[in-house]
Image (cartoon, rainbow, N blue to C red):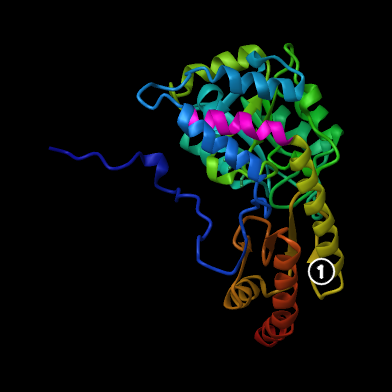
Amino acid sequence: MAIYPKRDDLRELSGYHSPQVSVKVRLNTNESPIAPPTDFVEAVSAAVHEVQWNRYPDRTATALRQDIAALHGVSADNVFVANGSNEVLQSLLLAYSGAGRKVVTFEPTYQLHSHIARIAGATVVSGQRNADFTLDAAEVRRVCAEHEPSVTFLCSPNNPTGLAESPDVLRAAIESTPGIVLVDEAYAQFSPHSALELVREDARVAVSRTYSKTWSMAAARLGYLVAPTWMIADLEIVALPYRLDALKQAAGRAALRYVKQMEAAVREVVTQRERLVAAMAKLPLTVWPSDANFILFRPAGAGRALWQALLDQSVLVRDCSSWQGLTDCLRVTVGTAEENDAFLAALQSALPFVLQSALQARD
Ligand code: PMP
């Protein structure tokens, strides 16, 4: 009897992984460095006793969707919830992409956009950013007009390059595609603008958000989409029933009672980000501006060597040096003041050596 191997179209793909190693200073996955308020943890502990553990959870997660909707001034019918925004994106791609359809990304960007699109069976077409990683509205129009994608991804602020997309770019995508424009706003609270106001019943725009960053809840795996009601209904067709457990629904609601604390934590991270950017700009590095909680930087010729040298000092950052268009680039997540001090000290001590070795290797 013949045994089926995995699908032919998965042969070229490998899983998406960021190293999880045990280090003193972990600045590689853009989590919040600040724990959620103690009162939030107390509220979740209390919820453990209220859950009817022998019963399935509310399949429609209505109370959670109502609370998220109230936060954004929309209706619960405009909100889709899932296990992290990655699952939101997967649901959207299952509903609107697939074999015979095209998905557009603008590289370099969040790798899971193209990865999940390929797993969903779609053909991925990549538009290009400028040398400084900004994106031109004209490039967006060109790619959308030529390929007529069923889904176009914009990531704002863009991971891993850092800047929010301009309103011109959003408009260009909306005007030139026959498909859905998904604006991934995982880092929106750190940035000056949002596409939420572009979500309307008669537009094909959706905005994804996550609890993993600004809400200090990466451990919970919770994300959502704000979109027209017809799109939410389409996503409910492909999503698994009872996907959000009862405790997660309670935790998601409890978090929304601490908006002020979340905003204070965001301000603290932004202050730390500006301090880091200023300190890094004085070093022999290329440093890109950021509207998010991470900073992209390039030690010329020495990306991988610097990543290892930092790790040797128990500081873990993201090695983006093998990603398309990001030769020698590393990405550091903004941490607490102490973590940032440790990162800067490790960087200052490692840089002269790795840059010197890179120069010697070139000569
Ligand atoms: N979108 C972007 C741009 C991200 O950077 C991330 C997390 N790295 C996600 C989505 C996924 O977040 P979540 O934890 O909600 O799945």
The residue segment tinted magenta is 246-258
The amino acid sitting under disc 1 is: Met
> Is 202 in the magenta?
no
Q: Is residue 46 above or below residue 95?
A: below
State the image quarter where residue 166 is shown: top right
Observer-nearest of 355 and 62: 62
Q: Secondary structure at mark 1?
A: helix
Q: Going 80% across and 40% down the picture, which residue do you hit?
A: 165
Q: Which residue is mark 1?
A: 280
Q: Is residue 299 left or right of residue 77?
A: right
Ligand 1 lies in which image quarter?
A: top right
Main secondary-structure element of the magenta-colored stretch: helix
Q: Within the image, what quadrant is residue 230 found in?
A: top right
**As drawn, 343 above or below 72:** below
Quarter of the N terminus within the rendering: top left
Is residue 345 at least partly visible in the picture?
Answer: yes
Q: Is residue 158 left or right of residue 192?
A: left
Q: Residues within 10 Å of mark 1 (few under 14, many from 20)?
A: some
Residue 82 in sight: no
| Residue at screen point 80% across, 45% down | 264
Q: Position of residue 34 (x, y in %)?
A: 68, 52
